[in-house]
Structures are given as structure tokens and as C-alpha cells.
Image: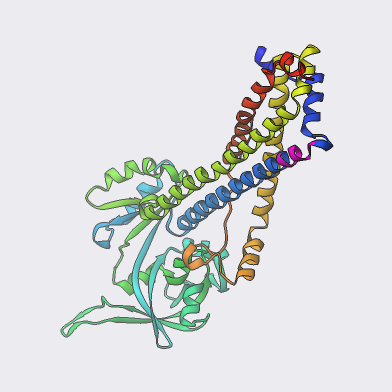
């Protein structure tokens, strides 16, 4: 109950705190410092919201796109061929927490068109997985990619690199062809480009060629086997625990690699960078709280006579403590709210801002060949926003304690003796 009374302001305390929030005409310098404090808090909070949301979006978008093409985990057979894969597929689909599981063939090969040869990844997918790419298609018809149709879908960057369009025929080269008395013959098979897609991951759009699984088995001479089974689960962060029963049954036959292992270097680097950026930007909030402290110290020195008069009129030390704590915390809260608003505005207009800076400087800030993604992603985590808000207000509150204690300990006798 005593803590509640401390937090609640009396009409007298509220009136004095309100007056101190707007210093008089002769205290323009104090008002300037207070304004700078609000501005610094606003900018630091805005930068925290912007950077953490962009980095969270970058991680989430990459995970979604990797999962959309590779799932959250894959079963990789020893030797590249998974025998009896139908039973393994049924076991995986029956595992609790598994949303989807599909057979998959993936092999690095070469493709040529108009005399240009490039390295590619041939992916053999089921009809359902190919149909799921419908919303990623830029040109052509994904429904035309059927078994024995002789058609494939290629990434937009790959199409641009080799100059292929829908309807053109590209040649896919498999160095591991059939064995003849004269050696191993190289298989060269022509496929018509039936669709051009864009996943949004630069490396995938630059190298992937997707065809029906049956055609991939024929091209790679795999018979009725597959190389991988891709798995999507309900909770990507706990994919290892979900697939633990399956992994035990596959001992000696295959290994399960989840998205953390497949892209461990990339995601670990992202996590380290994310923590480091939060730590560095938090120092901006700390600097802003020191500005609040300095403005309150100056306010206390300017209001020493007023404080002494209030003490002689019956104001207690608790009254003065609450007045100055309220004044400083309000400054921090105003800066925090303004920073949240500014941060969300910057997030909303992030792509025009990036394009504008690139136009003015002549430098491409968001290079998809470096950043993997073709656009600047954003994912706002409500818990992060709550944490950032709490950080701004708590540091502002802590910055008020010293000047507030200084004001509450003012001795009215010593001050008024020389007045």
C-alpha cells in the first residue's frame, strides 16, 4: 500500500511537476537540454525498433524461404540413394509435430544455352510441391511442368544469366552417364522452359532448375529411389526434439539435418550480430538517460530557492522526490513514445528510404547478391517492442534518482539564510 501511495501523485505534486516540465522564459537553456534529452531518447528508441525489426525480419524471412524450398529438415541417405523411402516417408508423416514431408531429389549439374554453360542445382519435386510454387511464378505456367512433358521451371536470375525465356530449350548435362565399352558417356538432355519463378533468395533464383521427380530420376539414372526427404514441422526451433524418434530408427541408413545445421554459419552470424547491435544501440538509450540526469541537475540548481520555500510551507522530502522523479520519467516516456512512433514510420517507409539513399549516393545499399533476399524484410516482435519500451522508461527513471534525492535533501535554512 505504501508503494502504491508513492506512485500516486497528489494535486500539489502533479501541478509542480507539470510546471517543471515547461521551464520559464528565463530558463531557456534548461528547456533546450530537456528538449535534447527527449530527442536523443526518441532517436535511440527509433533506431532500436528499426534495427531489431529489420534483423528479426531478415532471420524470419530467410527461415521461411529456406523452409518453403527445403523444409525445416531433410533426411539425407548415405550414398545419395534412400532405399525403401516410402516406408520412411510414412513414418515421418505419422510423427507428432510434423506438418508435411515430401520426397526430393537434388543434384548439382551443368546447364547450357546459346553457348553459355552455368552450374545449376536440379531439383526433382512431387506434383504437389511444384504446384505450391504457383505464387512464385513470374512467367509461364507452372501447371505445364508434368512428368514426361520435357518441361522445367528455372529461377529468374538463372534465366537472366543465360538469356533463356519461356519456350526456349536448355540443355542439362549430367557427367555421370551410362557406362559403355568406351567409357562413361555424358548425358545431355534438352528441356523446354515452361515457367520462370522467383523464390526471393538470390542463390536459389540463380541456380535452381525444378522438374518432376520422375524426370529427375530418369536424368540421374536413379531408378525408383530418392536422395532426400524434406520435412516441415510445427515448431522450427524444436525441430531436433520433434524428429528424435525418426532419427533413432534411421541409424546407419540416413542422417537428419535441420535448418540450424544446414545454414548454421549464416544463422549463428545473424544471431551474434543481432545481440551485438542491441547491446550497442542500448548504449544510445543510456546516453539519453544521462542527458535527462544533467537537465534535472540543472533544474534542481535553478529551483533551489523554490524548493526551500516549498519545504518551509510543509512540503516533505517524499513530495520533492516524487516531483522530480515524475518530471524526469515523463521526459523519458515522451521520448520513448515518440521513438516508437518514429521507428514504425521508418519501418513502413523503409524501402523508399533505401531507394532514396541509393539514388542520392549512387551506391546500391541492398544488394541481393550479398544479402540473399531481394527486398528489405521486417518482422516486428511484440516482446522486443515491450522490452525496448521498458528499457527506455527504466533507464529514464534511474537517471532521475540522483537529482531527485539531491532536491529532497535540500536544507531550507541554508538556502534562505542568504535570500
- Farthest-out residue, left: 181
**What span is in magenta?**
27-33
Quarter of the view holding residue 181 = bottom left
Q: Is residue 7 visible?
A: no
Asked if the stretch drawn in magenta spans residue 166, the answer is no
- Farthest-out residue, bottom: 115
- Label the magenta part by its dominant secondary structure: helix
Residue 354 in picture, x, y percent from top left:
62, 63
The residue lying toward the viewer, choosing from 177 and 346, is 346
Q: Is residue 247 visible?
A: yes
Residue 133 drawn above or below residue 111: above
The residue lying toward the viewer, choosing from 271 and 361, is 361
Q: Is residue 294 left or right of residue 84?
A: right
- Farthest-out residue, front: 418
Residue 292 in picture, x, y percent from top left:
66, 35
Residue 233 drawn above or below residue 121: above
Asked if the stretch drawn in magenta spans residue 30, the answer is yes
Q: Residue at x 71, y 16 (%)?
A: 414
Q: Residue at x 26, y 78 (%)?
A: 177
Q: Residue at x 36, y 81 (%)?
A: 189
Please state, as top left, top right, bottom left or bottom right, where the C terminus lies in the image. top right
Residue 137 in picture, x, y percent from top left:
55, 69
What colour scheme governs how the chains and residues are painted in the rendered image of this protein? Answer: rainbow
Amino acid at each position: 500500500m505504501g508503494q502504491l501511495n508513492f506512485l500516486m501523485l497528489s494535486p500539489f505534486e502533479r501541478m509542480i511537476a507539470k510546471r517543471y516540465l515547461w521551464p520559464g522564459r528565463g530558463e531557456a537553456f534548461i528547456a533546450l537540454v530537456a528538449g535534447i534529452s527527449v530527442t536523443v531518447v526518441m532517436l535511440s528508441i527509433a533506431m532500436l525498433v528499426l534495427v531489431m525489426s529489420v534483423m528479426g525480419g531478415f532471420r524470419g524471412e530467410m527461415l521461411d524461404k529456406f523452409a518453403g524450398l527445403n523444409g525445416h529438415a531433410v533426411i539425407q541417405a548415405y550414398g545419395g540413394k534412400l532405399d525403401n523411402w516410402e516406408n520412411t516417408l510414412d513414418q515421418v508423416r505419422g510423427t507428432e509435430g510434423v506438418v508435411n514431408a515430401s520426397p526430393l531429389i537434388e543434384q548439382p549439374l551443368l546447364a547450357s544455352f546459346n553457348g553459355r554453360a552455368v552450374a545449376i542445382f536440379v531439383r526433382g519435386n512431387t506434383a504437389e510441391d511444384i504446384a505450391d510454387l504457383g505464387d512464385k511464378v513470374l512467367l509461364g505456367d507452372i501447371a505445364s511442368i508434368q512428368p514426361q512433358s520435357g518441361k522445367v521451371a528455372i529461377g529468374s536470375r538463372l534465366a537472366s544469366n543465360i538469356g533463356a525465356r519461356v519456350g526456349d530449350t536448355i540443355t542439362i548435362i549430367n557427367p555421370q552417364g551410362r557406362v559403355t565399352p568406351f567409357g562413361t558417356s555424358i548425358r545431355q538432355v534438352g528441356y523446354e522452359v515452361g515457367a520462370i519463378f522467383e523464390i526471393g533468395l538470390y542463390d536459389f533464383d540463380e541456380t535452381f532448375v525444378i522438374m518432376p521427380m520422375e524426370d529427375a530420376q530418369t536424368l540421374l539414372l536413379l531408378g525408383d529411389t530418392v536422395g532426400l526427404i524434406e520435412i516441415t514441422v510445427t515448431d522450427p526451433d524444436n525441430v531436433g526434439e520433434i524428429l528424435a524418434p525418426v532419427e533413432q530408427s534411421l541409424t546407419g541408413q540416413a542422417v537428419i539435418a535441420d535448418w540450424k545445421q544446414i545454414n548454421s554459419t549464416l544463422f549463428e552470424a545473424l544471431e551474434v550480430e543481432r545481440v551485438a547491435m542491441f547491446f550497442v544501440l542500448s548504449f544510445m538509450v543510456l546516453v539519453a538517460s544521462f542527458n535527462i540526469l544533467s537537465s534535472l541537475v540543472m533544474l534542481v540548481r535553478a529551483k533551489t530557492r523554490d524548493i526551500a520555500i516549498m519545504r518551509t510551507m510543509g512540503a516533505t522530502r517524499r513530495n520533492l522526490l516524487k516531483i522530480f522523479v515524475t518530471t524526469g520519467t515523463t521526459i523519458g516516456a515522451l521520448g520513448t513514445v515518440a521513438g516508437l512512433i518514429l521507428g514504425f514510420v521508418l519501418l513502413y517507409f523503409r524501402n523508399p528510404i533505401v531507394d532514396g539513399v541509393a539514388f542520392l549516393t549512387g551506391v546500391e545499399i541492398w544488394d541481393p547478391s550479398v544479402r540473399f533476399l531481394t527486398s528489405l524484410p521486417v518482422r516486428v516482435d511484440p516482446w522486443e517492442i515491450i522490452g525496448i519500451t521498458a528499457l527506455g522508461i527504466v533507464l529514464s527513471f534511474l537517471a532521475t534518482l540522483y537529482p531527485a534525492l539531491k532536491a529532497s535533501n535540500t536544507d531550507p535554512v541554508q538556502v534562505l539564510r542568504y535570500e
